[in-house]
Amino acid sequence: MPAEKITLRTVATHAGVSIKTVSRVLNNEPFISALTREKVQDAIAKLEFSPNIAARQLRGQRSYSLAVVYEPPASEFLTGILEGILPVCRDASYKLLLEPLAATETRMRINTMIERRDVDGFIFLPPLSEDIALVQSVLDAGLHAILVASTIDLTAANLGVSKIGIDDFAAGQAMGRHLIAQGHRRIGYIRLREQHSMANQRGHGLRAALEEAGLPENNLSVAQGESSFDSGFAAAAELLDDKNPPSAIFAGNDYMAAGVIAYAREHGLSVPDDLSVVGFDGADLSKMFVPPFTTIKQPLKQYGDWAARKLLATINNPEVEKAEDILDFELIQRHSVKNIKRSNSL
C-alpha cells in the first residue's frame, strides 16, 4: 500500500489504539507501555507509513521546510542568496533544502517533493525561475513559490507568485554607457544560454547603449557562453579572432569575465592596456582576480532575505498580496577598463 495513502487513523486502527497514542509514539513520549509502543511500530512498518508524513499531519499539513531550486554547479550567486535566506529560516524554525536541477534535467525529483509535501514552498533561482510549467505545478499542488531574477510576466501567465530581481536591461545599459564614456567603440559581449532570459537582458541593454551613442550595430560582436570560466576563455578566443576585434569585452557574469582575462594573459595581452574586461554579479572573484575587474553588483543577500520573508508570509496567509520588487544594482569600477580617450589625448 503506498505510504501517501496511509493516515494516522489507519495506523491507529491497525494497531488497535487511539490516534493520540500513535502521535505519542511518533513523538517518542514517555509513559507508553513497551507492548503498546511495539504494536504501533509494527503497524507503521507493515503499512510503510512515513514518519515525515505523520509529522506533517500532526502539524496541520506543514513540513516546516523550504526548498531552493538552483542550477548546478553551486556558485557565488547561490551562496550570496543563501546568506539572506538562512537567517530568516533560522528565526522561523524552518529547515532549508537545496535542490540542484539542471535546466535540461527531468523534473521528477521536484514532482516527488511536491507529491510528498516535503516542503511548504519553493524559491526558484535562474534559469529555473523562467520555467512557467514548473512553477505552475507547484501552485497546482497548493504550495507556494517565489521567483528570483525572472522575466515571466506574472499577470500574462496568471501566476499567483511574487518575484524579485534587478533591472538587468538597465544594468547592461549602464555598463555599456561606462565603456563608451571611456572611449570604447567596438565592444564584445558574452551572453548566457537562452534559458537565462533575465540575464540576457544585459546584452539588450548594452546594445541600447551603443544605439544611444549613435554607434553602428556591427560595432557589437556577441559570443555564446555557458556561465563558466572555461566558456569565457573560449568566447574570448572567438571574439578576439576577428580582423577588427573589440577593445572591450563585457561578460554576462564574473566567471566568464575571469576566463576572458585568463585568455588575454595567456596570449600576451595586457588587461586593461590591450583589452578592457568587465563582468556582472559582483562575485568575490571580481575583486580577488588579477587585475580586479569592473562589474555590476547584484544585491544577492537582499534577494534571499526578501524571498524567504515573502514566502513565509505567503505560507502563513495565502491571501497576502503578491509583489514584484526591483532592487538597485551598483556599477563597481576597478582596474580592468582603459580610458582610451585619455590615452589618445596624451
Image (cartoon, rainbow, N blue to C red):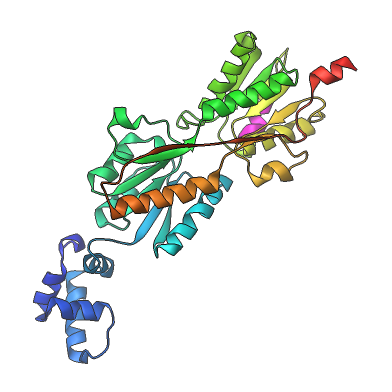
| Residue for point 69% across, 41% down | 286
Q: Is residue 234 rendered magenta in the image?
A: yes
Look at the image and tell me in which quarter the C terminus lies: top right
Residue 297 position within the rendered picture, expressed as x and y whole percent measured from the top left: 61, 39
Query: Is residue 104 visible to us here?
Result: no
Residue 72 position within the rendered picture, expressed as x and y whole percent measured from the top left: 50, 46
Q: Quadrant of residue 283?
A: top right
Residue 120 position within the rendered picture, expressed as x and y whole percent measured from the top left: 31, 55
Residue 23 position within the rendered picture, expressed as x and y whole percent measured from the top left: 21, 76
So how many labels did they put on this image?
Answer: 0
Look at the image and tell me in which quarter the N terminus lies: bottom left
| Residue for point 63% across, 8% down | 216
Please determine whether, in this image, residue 25 is positioned above or below residue 73.
below
Please determine whether, in this image, residue 30 is positioned above or below residue 282.
below
On screen, residue 168 versus residue 94, left or right, reads right
On screen, residue 249 versus residue 304, left or right, reads right
| Residue for point 42% across, 52% down | 308
Q: Is residue 222 rendered magenta in the image?
A: no
Which range of residues does the magenta coloring cover?
A: 231-236
Q: Would you say the magenta stretch is mainly helix, strand or loop?
A: helix
Q: Quadrant of residue 156?
A: top left
Comparing 117 with 237, the one in front is: 117
Residue sticking out furthest to the front: 321
Query: Is residue 252 visible to us here?
Result: yes
Comparing 192 with 303, the one in front is: 303
On screen, residue 16 versus residue 124, left or right, reads left
Q: Quadrant of residue 249?
A: top right
Residue sticking out furthest to the right: 346
